[in-house]
Amino acid sequence: MGSLLATMLDQQFTDLMEGDRYFFFWDQNLNPSEVDMIMNTRLSDIISRNTGLTSSCRTDE
């Protein structure tokens, strides 16, 4: 990825985050540990919690 594309994507996602009043960074009811938990959650964690699938089910390894 070139530096121009990287800069454009970074700016786009920053604008989306800052313009979304429901983005979790802006939630005053979350404590720092909850924000940290959200920041460290991967898509695979969400899939595992909601489907019962585990990393041992992956076929791309």
Image (spheres, rainbow, N blue to C red):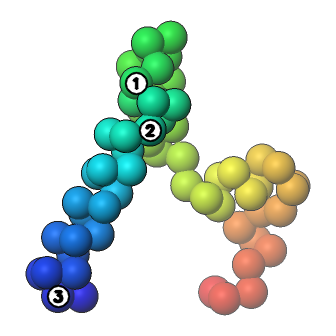
16 shown above or below 35: below
Q: Dot 2: what SS?
A: loop
Instruction: Name which of mark 3 and mark 2 comes first in the sequence.
Output: 3
Viewer can see residue 33: no
Q: Which mark is residue 26?
A: 1
For mark 2, what is the residue?
A: 20
Q: Quadrant of the N terminus?
A: bottom left
Left or right side of 14 for 20: right
Q: Quadrant of the C terminus?
A: bottom right
- Viewer-nearest residue: 8 or 32: 8
Instruction: Name which of mark 1 and mark 2 comes first in the sequence.
Output: 2
Q: Are marks 1 and 3 in contact (CB under 8 Å)?
A: no
Three-letter code, disc 2: Asp
Residue at the outermost right position: 52
Q: Are marks 1 and 2 in contact (CB under 8 Å)?
A: yes
38 shown above or below 34: below
Residue 14: horizontal and vertical position, in percent? Answer: 29, 51
Residue 53: horizontal and vertical position, in percent? Answer: 83, 62
For mark 3, what is the residue?
A: 2
Q: What residue lies at 38% left-to-right and 50% top-to-bottom?
A: 16
| Label 2 crowd bin: few (<14), some (14–19), many (20+), radius 10 Å | few
Q: Dot 1: what SS?
A: helix
Q: What residue lies at 22% left-to-right and 81% top-to-bottom?
A: 5
